[in-house]
Amino acid sequence: MPTPGEAPWATCASLAVAPSVDAAHIHGIVLKLASSKRTDKPSLVLISQLEFGPDGAMQLRESAQPTPLPEDERFLLLERDLLDQQIIDVHGHKVVRVNDVDLVWENIQDDLPDLSLRIAEVEVGMRGAVRRLLKGLPSTSVDRISSRFGASVIPWDFVDLIDRDPARRVRLKIEQDRLSKMHPSDIADILEELAPAERHALFVSLDEEVAAEALEEVKPKMQQSLIESLDSEQIAGIVEEMDPGAAADLLSELTDERSEAILEEMDPEERQEVEDLLEFAGNSAAGRMTTEYLALPSSALADHAIAALREFEGDIDMITDIYLLDEEEKIIALVPLVQLLLAAPGTPWRICPTAISSPATWMPTAAR
C-alpha cells in the first residue's frame, strides 16, 4: 500500500456482487492497478481481504491476492449494471431510476475483524443524483451539499432489477411472489413506463396467469409489442389464461399465419372457445365479448333486461354490460348494469341506444 505522498497503487473501478452467493452484500472491489496497461483486465479483491488500518483507513490485508476479474457473467457490477438503470419498486408499484447506492460496513462477528459490506438501499431521488454529480470532491463537501435535499430511497429487499438479458436476471434476488400479488393494472402501468428492453425482460419473467392478466390491461399496440418476440408456444400458454373474448381480440390483430400458429399450440377446449369468437366480425356481439354475455334487441325495455338477467344460465359475475343489437345482430350500444338501478319497480323503461363508443342510457317512456 502507498504511504502518504506516494502515487496510488490502484483505483477502485467498481463494486462486484455475486448474486448466486449473496445478493445482499458486496463480494469484492474491482481495482484498476496503477501499473496495468490499458488492455489489462481489472483486478478483483474480495471484501474478506480488506481491513481497517490503525488510522481508520481501508487497506489490504498482507495475505490479499488480487486476481483478474473473470469475463463471465457471474458478477453484477454496480457501476455498470445498477446505476442509472430502471428498477421496479415492488413495494411502491412504480418504476424508478437508480441514482446512487447506500452501503453499510458490518462486522461479520463482533469479536472478529472480518468485514462485510451490505447493500442497504438505493437512492432514487435528487439527493442521490447530487452525490453522483459531486463525485470526486471531498466527502464532507458532498455530504453538506446533498443533505439539503430530502432522501428518497428504496430498501434493497424491495427492489427488482430489470436486466436487458433475461437470462442474467437470476443473478439478483427477484421477489416474484410480491410482483405476482400486484394488481394487473399496476403491472400494466409498470410495463408501459419501461423502456422496450426492460419491458420485455419483465414480461417474460411473469408466470402465464399474471402475464395474461397484465396483457388484458394494456393497450392493443402495447400487446403486440410484448408478444412480438415470443414464440407461438409461449404466447399460447398466456392466451389460454386470458378471457376468451380478450384472447380473440388479441389474435384478430395478428396475421392469419401467426394467429393459426398460436391456436395450434393451445389446448383443444380453450382453442375452440377462441376460434368460435374469431369467426365473427370485430363489431358483432360475439366478436367483441366473451362467451359469457347478454345481448338484447335495441327495442328492449328495462323489464326485459331484468328478466333476461334472472334467466341467464351462465356465470352472472361475468356480466357487467348488456349489449344492444340491431336487426343484423351488430352491436349498436352497450348498457352498464348499474343503469338498471335507475329503473323503478314496475315502471317500463325503454333503452335509448347510443354509439358503441359511448355508454348507453336509459330513458323513461310511457306505459304501453
Image (tube, rainbow, N blue to C red):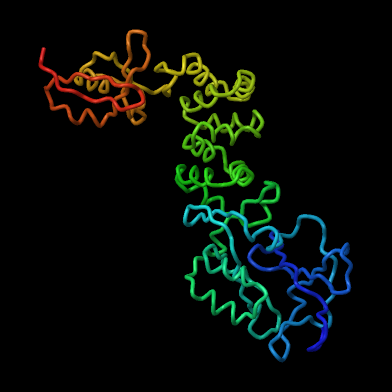
Which residue occupies the foreground of this view, 116 or 122?
122
Please determine whether, in this image, residue 177 is positioned above or below residue 151.
above
User: From this viewpoint, is residue 229 visible?
Assistant: yes
In-image side of 361 versus 96 (left or right) = left
Which residue occupies the foreground of this view, 61 or 3?
3
Please determine whether, in this image, residue 29 is positioned above or below residue 244.
below
Task: Pinpoint residue 105: horizontal percent, then vertical percent.
Answer: 64, 77
Task: Pinpoint residue 209: horizontal percent, then vertical percent.
Answer: 52, 38
Q: Residue at image x 62%, y 21%? A: 264
Please identify the quadrant where the C terminus is shown. Answer: top left
Residue positioned most to the top: 327
Task: Pinpoint residue 24: horizontal percent, then vertical percent.
Answer: 63, 65
Please identify the quadrant where the N terminus is shown. Answer: bottom right
In-image side of 94 versus 102 (left or right) = left
Q: Residue at image x 69%, y 47%? A: 165
Task: Pinpoint residue 361: horizontal percent, then vertical percent.
Answer: 24, 25
Quadrant position of residue 96: bottom right
Quadrant position of residue 135: bottom right
Q: Residue at image x 67%, y 52%? A: 170
Please determine whether, in this image, residue 208 is positioned above or below residue 26.
above
Which residue occupies the foreground of this view, 8 or 267?
8
Which residue occupies the foreground of this view, 337 or 352?
352
